[in-house]
Amino acid sequence: MSSLPLPTYADVQAAAARIDGYAHRTPVLTSRTANAELGAEVFFKCENLQRMGAFKFRGAYNALARFDEAQRRAGVVAFSSGNHAQAIALSARLMGIPATIVMPLDAPAAKVAATRGYGAEVVLYDRYKEDREEIGRNLAQQKGMTLIPPYDHADVIAGQGTAAKELFEEVGSLDSLFVCLGGGGLLSGSALSTRALSPHTRLYGVEPEAGNDGQQSFRSGSIVHIDTPQTIADGAQTQHLGNLTFPIIRRDVNDILTVSDAELRAAMRFFAERMKIVVEPTGCLGFAAARAMKQQLQGQRVGIILSGGNVDIARYAALLAE
Ligand SMILES: *Cc1c(COP(=O)(O)O)cnc(C)c1O
């Protein structure tokens, strides 16, 4: 299928050394209520408590740490309205690298402000008339900047894999692991760590029902493209898997599951009420899926990656109340 060189677990190990001391080694939380509900022993890897509020800091920092002198001077460009933008902006600031982030004109003001707050230059574009990838590529060409995509990049994948690596190091082997899935950077990185550290774990990627391109791709054997899905899981509104993430997912993942927005809201409520933690809708994908298949998880040791906690507080309150 693909002849691209794929990242390996050795790359995850190298990434772990690079981010050491810069990224948080996030806590693993447990909940008796969750254990009782699932009839399993559940371990939550809390990337909602990662720097800038999501695992994306890991991949961004790892990618920027590999820049050579000329790349550092010219700077980095990224296109994103979400966590990848903030991850690149913060990592760049920590390393003194200039960053330009391409965001849609209608991106939430708070996100634009947060990205600027990390010192990045924000370039706005009209998402109905302009192509962000082309804008990013042009900036990269004209100014010699390096474009770092949100998931389809070997250093990004390797960095994202460090979260699952830490989880296995802390709790040992697991019977099942549930990972949120958008473009597949987190899932493919987690797959590399899983097959190295706990090879018999059943590894599941979880997508919003409205955007099950990953499930379709996994089952059909080639990358399926869809229109931007309507879902509250805004971190998983991707239209397709990547040329690097897909072959790893195909090789190392056991299945791709989907959950509804209602199940995501119920999981958000669980985290708020029972565990006193804020998890954004996309970060709830894994737990929502585990709840739905608890019959198969009886007596198991189950890992769940909570991918992020960035949600506008008014929106959070509205989602909890719905
Ligand atoms: C980006 C993101 C995802 C999806 O990650 P991919 O690597 O694109 O699959 C999931 N959750 C959160 C919070 C994110 O920011």
Image (tube, rainbow, N blue to C red):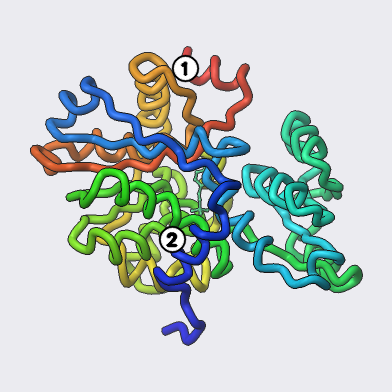
Q: Give percent across and percent down for residue 106.
A: 77, 38
Task: Kindly identify the residue that appears in the image at 46 percent across and 49 percent down.
Answer: 211
SS label for mark 1: helix
Q: Amino acid at mark 2?
A: Gly
**In front here: 16 or 34?**
16
> Mark 2, residues whose alpha carbon is within 10 Å: few (<14), some, or many (≥20)?
many
**Mark linked to residue 320:** 1
Which is more N-terminal, label 2 or label 1? 2
In this view, the residue in front, 221 or 64, is: 64
Residue 49 coordinates in the image, percent (x, y): 51, 33
The quarter of the picture where residue 310 lies is top right
In this picture, is 283 found above or below 270? Answer: below
Q: Which mark is residue 162?
A: none
Depth-wise, is mark 1 or mark 2 nearer the camera? 2
Tell me: residue 84, above or below residue 144. above
Q: Which residue is mark 2?
A: 189
